[in-house]
Image (cartoon, rainbow, N blue to C red):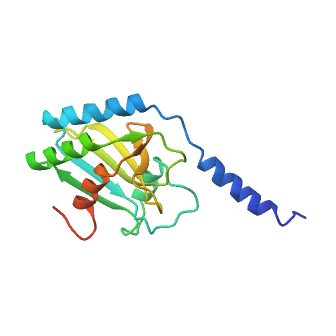
């Protein structure tokens, strides 16, 4: 017979493993941000594809980058919001401004991802990918990945995204 404490210990162990922080290469992340700003200024980024798992959707483990593919096949469209946005000159300038204000730092815990943002060129090729987590009480920014590099993001990018991709408003 298994002792009563085994299940909670196993669950706690799974949570600790899933929340382990991977190495953060801030220089590579900053290089990605600089590249995105340059490509926005040059007009090379034409479209943004966004997939978002609503913050209220509960999961048993933290959502990782590869989980977005699993959620994209869900029958219930309220689980995953998918939208694209063609970047006009004005939107491109606003997004470049958000990236100029973007500050990066090393996170202390792994993210529970809720946003997938793919920046694409005119042909639809992926130039950059960004993943951001859900909000947490008493936090100012978001944790996530930029081109595969784990970081903490200041709120400038998320503010721009929420203005354009909230469920109640489109621009």
In the rendered structure, the answer to whether residue 145 lies left or right of residue 35 reads right
Where in the figure is residue 2, as x and y percent of width and height?
Answer: 87, 63
Tell me the quarter of the picture where residue 82 sits.
bottom left
Q: Vertical placement of 139 versus 127: above or below? A: below
Q: Quadrant of the C terminus?
A: bottom left
Tell me the quarter of the picture where residue 162 sits.
bottom left
In the rendered structure, the answer to whether residue 6 lies left or right of residue 88 reads right
Q: Residue at x 26, y 57 (%)?
A: 83
Where in the figure is residue 132, as x and y percent of width and height?
Answer: 40, 50
Q: Quadrant of the N terminus?
A: bottom right
Q: Work out whether residue 42 or residue 50 is closer to the camera in this orientation and state it.
A: 42
The residue lying furthest to the left in this view is 89
Where in the figure is residue 119, as x and y percent of width and height?
Answer: 26, 42
Q: Work out whether residue 165 or residue 94 is closer to the camera in this orientation and state it.
A: 94
Q: Residue at x 19, y 33 (%)?
A: 39
Where in the figure is residue 30, as x and y percent of width and height?
Answer: 34, 32
Label tally: 0
Q: Residue at x 40, y 55 (%)?
A: 140
Tell me the quarter of the picture where residue 146 sits.
top left
Q: Residue at x 27, y 32 (%)?
A: 34
Q: Vertical placement of 106 versus 31: above or below? A: below
């Amino acid at each position: 017979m298994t002792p009563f404490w085994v299940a909670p210990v196993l669950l706690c162990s799974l949570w600790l493993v899933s929340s382990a922080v991977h190495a953060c290469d801030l220089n590579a992340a900053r290089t990605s941000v600089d590249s995105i700003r340059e490509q926005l200024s040059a007009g090379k980024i034409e479209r943004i594809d966004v997939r978002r798992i609503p913050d209220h959707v509960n999961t048993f483990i933290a959502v990782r980058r590869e989980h977005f593919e699993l959620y994209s096949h869900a029958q219930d469209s309220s689980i995953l919001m998918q939208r694209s946005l063609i970047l006009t000159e004005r939107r491109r300038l606003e997004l470049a401004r958000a990236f100029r204000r973007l500050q990066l730092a090393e996170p202390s815990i792994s993210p529970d991802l809720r946003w997938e943002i793919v920046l694409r060129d005119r042909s639809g090729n992926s130039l950059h990918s960004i993943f951001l987590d859900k909000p947490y009480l008493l936090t100012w920014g978001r944790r996530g990945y930029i081109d595969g590099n784990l970081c903490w993001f200041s709120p400038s990018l998320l503010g721009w995204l929420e203005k354009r991709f909230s469920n109640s408003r489109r621009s």
